């Protein structure tokens, strides 16, 4: 199973480099089902793997001049605050068993994953549907930065709650709110994910998490090869096709996770 896990890690890197998101959506299942790690541990490992590979990917986009640093930092700083607030304060106070409805037991895990899947489905609509181009001059610069920062904080809270890098939410926000082209949004998203994920993993370490560094380092190295390939491939794909492909990817993953959670709920 480990060999399959490393192959899947390579694919995860390709997805992250090509689409600027979706890495943690794939990394957590890889860690749980192919490497046999507990879900909580897998979430922390995912932050490191996705964060490190996103650093490499964002560096490649920086060299090509395809990152908007002003938008990225305006989004990343409040997003990091949101992630840490969610993981350190919000999640710990939620009980493992929340309650029951009509004999169905609702657990924290089901709540998190169901929320995750619904947000993915909603986010996919803005990428699949046709969008009218909007001029960035519509907003005053300070209003635009403030709006992006608020969006970053909210998405950080959500990303911390569901234990993901949040690329599936970041890219739609960068495209529809900040007015970035898909290619610039992908590069900027990688920068945001790198900062957000590594800061989240650092927080886990400070809270006493133990780490299997040989396994984590190997997975990260394999994923790094994938992100180099994915970033190069992204240059050969038309922007509109890339945008729609990302939307369908998020939709399929979200629907799959939601169906799985409904099945788990009905089987309890």
Image (spheres, rainbow, N blue to C red):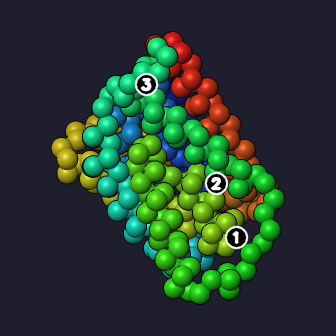
Distance between the Cα atoms at labels 1 and 3? 40 Å
Query: Is residue 168 something that shows in the picture?
Result: yes
Picture layout, residue 70 above or below residue 132: below
What element does badge 2 sit on?
Answer: helix
97 horizontally vs 27: left or right: left
Task: Say whether disc 3 or disc 2 marks the residue closer to the N-terminus.
Answer: 2
Residue at 53% x, 26% y is 261
Between disc 2 and disc 1, the foreground one is: 1
What element does badge 3 sit on?
Answer: strand
Distance between the Cα atoms at labels 2 and 1? 13 Å
- Depth check: 212 or 25 in front? 25
Distance between the Cα atoms at labels 3 and 2? 33 Å
According to the picture, the residue beneath numbered tag 3 turns out to be 106
What element does badge 1 sit on?
Answer: loop
Across and down, in percent, residue 254 comes to 62, 38
Picture layout, residue 96 above or below residue 141: above
Quadrant assignment, res 157: bottom left
Q: Are marks 1 and 3 in contact (CB under 8 Å)?
A: no
According to the picture, the residue beneath numbered tag 2 turns out to be 19
Picture layout, residue 21 above or below residue 71: above
How many C-alpha atoms fall within 10 Å of the one at disc 2: few (<14), some, or many (≥20)? many
Across and down, in percent, residue 48 comes to 38, 49
Task: Say whether disc 2 or disc 1 marks the residue closer to the N-terminus.
Answer: 2
Query: Is residue 14 something that shows in the picture?
Result: no
Between disc 3 and disc 2, the foreground one is: 3
Between disc 1 and disc 3, the foreground one is: 3
Across and down, in percent, residue 251 comes to 68, 41
């Amino acid at each position: 199973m480990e060999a399959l896990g490393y192959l899947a890690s390579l694919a995860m890197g390709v997805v992250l480099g090509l689409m600027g998101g979706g890495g943690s959506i794939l990394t957590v299942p890889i860690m749980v089902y192919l490497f046999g790690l507990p879900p909580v541990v897998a979430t922390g490992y995912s932050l490191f793997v996705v964060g490190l590979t996103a650093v490499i990917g964002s560096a490649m986009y920086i060299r090509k001049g395809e990152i908007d640093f002003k938008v990225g930092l305006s989004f990343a700083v409040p997003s990091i605050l949101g992630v840490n607030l969610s993981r350190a304060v919000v999640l710990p106070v939620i009980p493992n068993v929340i309650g029951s409805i009509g004999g169905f037991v609702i657990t924290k895990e089901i709540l998190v994953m169901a929320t995750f899947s619904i947000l993915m489905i909603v986010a996919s609509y803005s990428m699949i549907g046709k969008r009218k181009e909007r001029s960035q001059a519509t907003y005053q610069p300070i209003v635009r930065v403030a709006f992006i920062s608020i969006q970053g904080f909210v998405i950080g809270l959500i990303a911390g709650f569901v234990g993901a890098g949040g690329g599936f939410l970041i890219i739609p926000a960068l495209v529809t709110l900040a007015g970035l082209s898909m290619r610039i949004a992908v590069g900027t998203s990688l920068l945001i994910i790198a900062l957000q994920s590594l800061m989240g993993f650092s927080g886990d370490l400070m809270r006493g998490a133990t780490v299997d560094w040989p396994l984590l380092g190997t997975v990260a190295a394999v994923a790094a090869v994938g992100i180099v390939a994915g970033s190069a491939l992204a240059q050969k794909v038309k922007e509109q096709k890339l945008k729609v492909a990302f939307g369908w990817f998020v939709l399929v993953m979200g629907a799959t996770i939601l169906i799985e959670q409904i099945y788990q709920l009905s089987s309890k």
